[in-house]
Image (cartoon, rainbow, N blue to C red):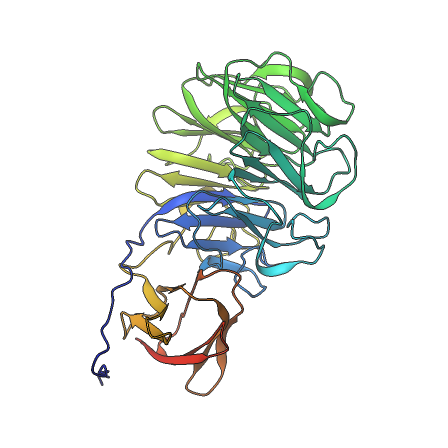
Amino acid sequence: MKIKFLLPLGFSVVLLSQINFCSAQKIAAGAYQSIAVCNSGIVQGWGFNTYGELANGNSGNVDTPIVTLFSGVTVAVSAGANHTLALKNDGTVWASGFNVSGQLGDGSVNPSLIPVQVNSLTGVIAIEAGTLNSLALKSDGTVWGWGDNGFGQLGTGNTTSSNIPVQTINLSSVTAIAAGNYHSLALKSDSTVWAWGYQLGTGTNINIDTAKQIVGLTGIIAIAAGNTFSLALKSDGTVWALGGNNEGELGDSTTTNSYIPVQVLNLSGVTAITAGVYHSLAIKNDSTVWAWGYNTAGGLGDGTNTDRHAPVQVNQITSATEINAGLNHSLVKKKNGSVWSFGLNTSGELGNGTFTDSNIPVQVAPLCVGDTVITIGINTVTDNKTQMIVYPNPANANEPISIKCNSTINELLITNVLGQIVFQAKPHADNFSFRLDKAGIYFVRVKMGDASLIEKIIVVR
C-alpha cells in the first residue's frame, strides 16, 4: 500500500539538503570505542558505550555504527579512555562520556550520554583526548587542558585537576598537540617538541608539571603520544620514539626504555603516525600501513598475535590515508573513504557486526551509507509562524535523519503509532542527527523556544 500526502495550498517544499553519505572524513579510536565523521558532518560511533562515549543519548555497547548527537563536526574528533571530543567548524568543542576527573570540561564531574559544550573555549583548531584528560589547541598557538592533572599533564605548574579548561603555561606558537595516558606533547612552529606530565621522555623519569623541550628532536612535522611513550615524525620521513618500551612500542627491536629519542627501525618515507596505548602505526608514502608493539589481540593487523619490536606491514591495506590507534584496536581509512579495523573487539569496537577479535583488517560496515540524509527542516517564516518540512517523506529505514532549524528547540520527541517514545532529546545546538532503524509511521513533535508545538508524520519504509 502506498501512502500519499497532499500539501495544503500555499505550502511549498524546500529541499534543504541531499548529502552524499558514503564515506568517512575523520576517524578516532578510543580505549574501546571508535568514532567517524561522515562527509555530511554527521558523526557515527561504535563499540563501548557504558558512559555515553557514543553520545547517542543511551548507554550500551554496539557492534555497528550508530549516529551520534554530535553535529556540525567538520574539523576533528578524538576518543579517550571513556570519553569523546568533537570539534565543530565554529571553533567550539563538545564532549560526552565519563567525567570523573572533569575531562568533559563542562564544569562538572558528571558523565553525559549526550554532547555537552566545553566551557568558555572558542577558536579551537585541534583537540586531543587522553585517558582522563583533554587538550585543545587554539588558533593563537596556545594550549588548553582540562581533567585529571595528577602527573602534571595539564601543564599548569601544579597537579590540581580542573573540570574547565586551563591554559598550559610557558607554551606558545604551538602547531600540533598529542595526549597520552598521563603525559602531553606539543609541536611548536620551530619544529621542536615539548612534553609535560608523566615522564619517560625528556631525559629524566621525573614527572614535570610545565612544558619542557625534548632534546634531540628537531625538524619534526608530526607527533603522537601513547601510554608512557612518544613518537615524532621528521621531515625526512623517519620516525623517532622515546619512553616506555616494555611491549616494543619504540620499534627499535628492543624492549628497553629510552630517555632519549631512538629511531624506529626499517621505516622510511613515512607520512603519518599514530600511537595507541601500547602499539603504534605509520603510513608510508606508498599508502601502506606499518605497525609495531603490543599485539596479543591482533591490533597490529599482521595476521598474528605476536608482539613486534620493529615495524611489520599491516595485511591487505593499500591506499591508506588516515590511521588511529586505540587501546588494543586500530582503525585505517582508505582513499575511497571506507574504514577498516583490526584488534580487540570485546565491545564491538571493530564495527563489523560481531564481538570477535580480528588480527587482520575487517571493514567497518555499514558506515556513512545511504544516498540521501532524511532532513527535517524547522523554520520560522516571515509571519512569525513556525513550519516543519520533511524530505524525503516517505523515507527509507536506517538512513540518518538530520534536524536543521533557525529557532531554538526545547525538546524533540518521536513516537510510533502505539505512542511509544522511540527518540527523545533536549538538544544543546540547533543542528543534530539520529536514525530510525525500523519501518513504520512515526509522529515528530517539536517544542520550540516560544513554547509552541509543531507536529509532523514521517513514513519510514
Which part of the image, by quadrant, shows the C terminus? Answer: bottom left
- Residue 3: name its quadrant: bottom left
Q: Does 63 sit left or right of 198 as displayed?
A: left
> Vertically, is 308 above or below 298?
above
Q: Residue at x 54, y 58 (%)?
A: 55
Q: Position of residue 443 (x, y in %)?
A: 40, 81
> Vertically, is 451 above or below 263?
below
Is residue 264 in sight in this rendering?
yes
Viewer-proximal residue among 284 and 158: 158
Q: Residue at x 51, y 53 (%)?
A: 356
Viewer-proximal residue among 327 and 27: 27
Q: Residue at x 46, y 46 (%)?
A: 90
Is residue 244 in sight in this rendering?
no
In this view, which residue lies farthest toward the front? 383
Q: Position of residue 341 (x, y in %)?
A: 45, 44
Q: Residue at x 47, y 47 (%)?
A: 88
Q: Position of residue 183 (x, y in %)?
A: 68, 32
Viewer-proximal residue among 448 and 158: 448
Q: Does 7 sit left or right of 134 as displayed?
A: left
> Vertically, is 127 above or below 368?
above
Q: Position of residue 144 (x, y in %)?
A: 63, 37
Which part of the image, by quadrant, shows the N terminus? Answer: bottom left
- Residue 315: name its quadrant: top left
- Residue 268: name its quadrant: top left
Q: How many marks?
A: 0
Viewer-proximal residue among 306 and 414: 414
In this view, which residue lies farthest toward the bottom? 418
